Amino acid sequence: MITRSWLKRLTVALVLCLIVRTVWLIGKRAWLRAEGDREFAAAVAETESRDADWSWDKLEGSRTRPAPGKNSIEVIRKVSELSPKEWLVRNGGGNWAPVAPSSPANTRYPERVINSAREVLTSATPAVELAFTLKDYPHGYARFEVTPDVISTLVPHVDETRHAATLLTWGVELALESQDPVRAVAGLFAMLNTSRAIGDDPFLVCQMVRMATRAVATRTLERTLAQTQLGEESLRSLQAAWASDAEEPLLLYGLRGERALMDLMFKNLTEGVVSVDGEMRKEGRQGWFRLCVVVVPRAIPERSRVLSPLYDSGSRDRETSDP
């Protein structure tokens, strides 16, 4: 009898413990959800007070658009269309350009490299000549078709921009070989505008390409200054163009866009537009989506607060640089 009594008490105690544990877990989960919602709402409110156009729809709607007929992205796409198909990355190409040896800016490339470049560019003369007209197109805009999962969004104009920049690099190099400073200067402005075609694209990868193509343009500028004599007017114009572009807050463009895109992705996940299980089954997505749905949500409030001072700084810099 004593044994049965203690067994009954022990069973009741275990059941009570399980009930208490279950209630505690449910309560803790509800508290964490409420606390997370509160922190997220506070972070969103703080972000909106600093950056009213931070969400994707507003950010995309506020982007700078060139005047009709003056969009450099349209010209860059035509340059790709006029180029040999096997040269394009989307067709498995991209390695058509001669390999430039590492050398000081005041050193000419070997004759074999110059001959190779001349032969290659001659086979794509229409594309090269069109690329040089980019000197008259200082602004660009690309519209994005954002996919529900965000990370599948395509940015084909990025590879096309790289392609145009490579064409122009060798176009300027051949102009230097021909002792044609006027064409070299035109090519330099076209190269800078090729990088500027990325504009305020709200993807970090796009801004990284803008930085990379601008760096290529700057190295080509250094070679031009080291190998030919430019007039004062050309020097002043080049200096003004490079100084103006240096004031562009490229990192801010990219980070604001990534924040808006992450917010859009989580919104789609929350509303069931995108299935986590479905995305996790896709090849190559497991690690990325695990990062997105586990690590990033914990940092959402802090992420918004970290970007706010950067946005404030970028806004002040633009106001200061305005005439």
Image (cartoon, helix red, strand yellow):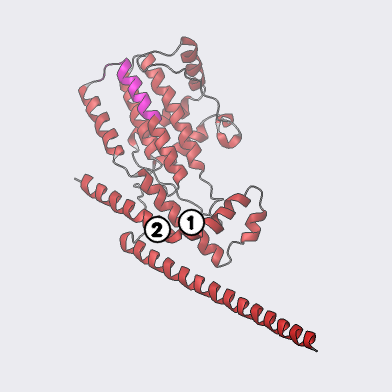
Asked if residue 233 is positioned above or below residue 137 in the image, the reply reads above
Q: Amino acid at mark 1?
A: Met
Residue 91: give x, y in percent of width and height. 60, 35
Q: Earlier in the sequence, mark 1 or mark 2?
A: 1
Q: Which quarter of the figure has residue 13?
A: bottom right
Residue at the left extreme?
Answer: 323
Q: Which mark is residue 304?
A: 2
Labels 1 and 2 touching (C-beta < 8 A): no
Return the residue found at the far right. Answer: 1
Q: Is residue 227 above or below residue 143?
A: above
> Relative to 299, is 191 on the left or the right?
left
Q: Which residue bears the numbered disc 1? A: 262
* Element carrying mark 2: helix
Considering only vertical position in the picture, is 273 above or below 75?
below
Tell me the quarter of the picture where residue 301 sits. bottom left
| Residue that sits furthest to the bottom in the current view | 1
- Determine the secondary structure under disc 1: helix
Q: Quick one: 265 or 164, which is closer to the camera? A: 265
* Residue 213 location (% of width, % of height): 41, 33
The answer to whether residue 198 is seen in the rendering is yes
Instruction: Tell me: 94 left or right of 61.
Output: right
CA gap, disc 1 and disc 2: 11 Å
Q: Is residue 219 magenta?
A: yes
* Depth check, front residue: 290 or 194: 290
Asked whether residue 221 is drawn in magenta, I would say: yes
Which residue is rendered at x = 30% and y = 49% of the image?
A: 314
Q: Which residues are magenta?
A: 216-230
